[in-house]
Image: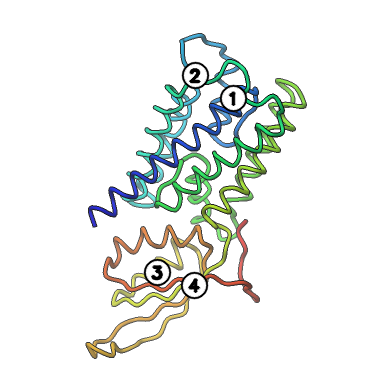
């Protein structure tokens, strides 16, 4: 178990480096902007125009995430909080000390967006696969998802990013906003290919704790069917829970099961198609 924890934190570290490298090496030198709290931090940094010898966007991003970290701790448990905190701390350090080229490494903006988006998106995807999070809008979106079944993390992120890039168009130049949007598209595509967070999955959970049912209903806001089963070897009674979740929600489920029932047996199967009354959260 300890080795798995160490491996997950090393994976998050690698993901943080890829994310920061994509931004500091390809996006920042081109004068472009990320979405989310990182993008807000970059805009504030540009408007302040402070010459302190290093890029303060990472520090600003960490400060913006402090209230969101508290939200993660009280809403999603200790494990996700610690991994998200580790991810944000490593991102802040790497953002601050990873050298930013004075001139874009690649002269073509579109190619910079492509390479930077692939690297940054892969970094975030790797972090998510390790059970962590880069903080920011993901935490806020997941919180609102718990409060409302009609809420979508992806839709919320899309709206906030639209506001950020509209600000870029007004404060800077239209090409800056357009290329930033193109980068954001590549970035999102790279996350999906790395983490597959929009793939629907069916989940079978074998547990003696009926609280698992309440967790799926109220924490994930997903429907669940359960029945009583009997262990073939132990002849002991158990509950069998069945639900359809997104890949992203499976990660939240895993973290919650560590608290509800660490001994639960889980089978996750990817689905090509889900029909009927299933809410797709993009």
Q: Distance of mark 4 from mark 2, alpha carbons?
A: 43 Å
Looking at the rendered structure, the secondary structure element under dot 4 is strand
Q: Residue at x 62, y 73 (%)?
A: 274
Residue shown at 54%/57% (left/top)? 197
> Residue at left 34%, top 81%?
239
Residue 276 appears left or right of 217: right
First reached walking from the N terminus: tag 3 or tag 2: 2
Along the polypeptide, which appears first: circle 4 or circle 2? 2
Above/below status of 28 relative to 273: above
Label 3, residues with CA under 10 Å away: few <14, some 14-19, many ≥20: some
Residue 50 locus on image (x, y percent): 52, 10
- If you read the primary sequence from the N terminus, does the residue marked by circle 1 or circle 2 appear first? 1
Front of the two marks 4 and 3: 4
Indicate the secondary structure of the residue bearing disc 2: loop
Residue assigned mark 3 = 214
Height in image: 187 above or below 45? below
Cα separation, mark 4 vs mark 3, equals 22 Å
Q: Crowdedness of circle 4 by 10 Å Cα count: few (<14), some, many (20+)?
A: few
Mark 1 and mark 4 residues within 8 Å of each other at the beta carbon:
no
Q: Which of marks 1 and 4 is nearer the N terminus?
A: 1
């Amino acid at each position: 178990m300890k080795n798995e924890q160490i491996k997950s934190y090393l994976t998050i570290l690698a993901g943080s480096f890829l994310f920061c490298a994509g931004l500091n090496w390809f996006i920042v030198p081109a004068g472009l902007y990320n979405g989310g709290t990182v993008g807000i931090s970059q805009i504030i940094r540009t408007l302040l125009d402070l010459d302190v010898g290093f890029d303060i966007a990472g520090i600003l991003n960490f400060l913006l995430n402090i209230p969101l970290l508290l939200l993660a701790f009280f809403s999603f448990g200790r494990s996700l909080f610690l991994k998200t905190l580790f991810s944000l701390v490593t991102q802040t350090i790497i953002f601050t000390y990873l050298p930013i080229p004075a001139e874009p490494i690649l002269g073509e903006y579109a190619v910079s967006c492509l390479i930077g988006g692939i690297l940054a998106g892969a970094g975030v995807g790797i972090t998510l696969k390790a059970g962590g999070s880069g903080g920011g809008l993901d935490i806020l979106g997941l919180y609102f998802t718990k409060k409302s079944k009609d809420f979508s993390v992806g839709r919320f992120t899309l709206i906030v990013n639209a506001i950020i890039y509209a600000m870029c168009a007004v404060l800077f130049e239209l090409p800056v906003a357009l290329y930033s949007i193109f980068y954001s598209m590549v970035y999102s595509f790279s996350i999906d290919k790395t983490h597959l967070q929009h793939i629907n999955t069916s989940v079978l959970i074998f547990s003696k704790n009926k609280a698992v049912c309440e967790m799926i209903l109220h924490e994930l806001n997903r429907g669940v069917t359960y029945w009583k089963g009997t262990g073939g070897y132990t002849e002991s009674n158990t509950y069998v829970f069945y639900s359809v979740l997104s890949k992203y929600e499976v990660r939240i489920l895993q973290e919650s099961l560590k608290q509800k029932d660490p001994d639960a047996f889980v089978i996750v199967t990817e689905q090509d198609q889900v029909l009927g009354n299933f809410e797709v959260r993009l």
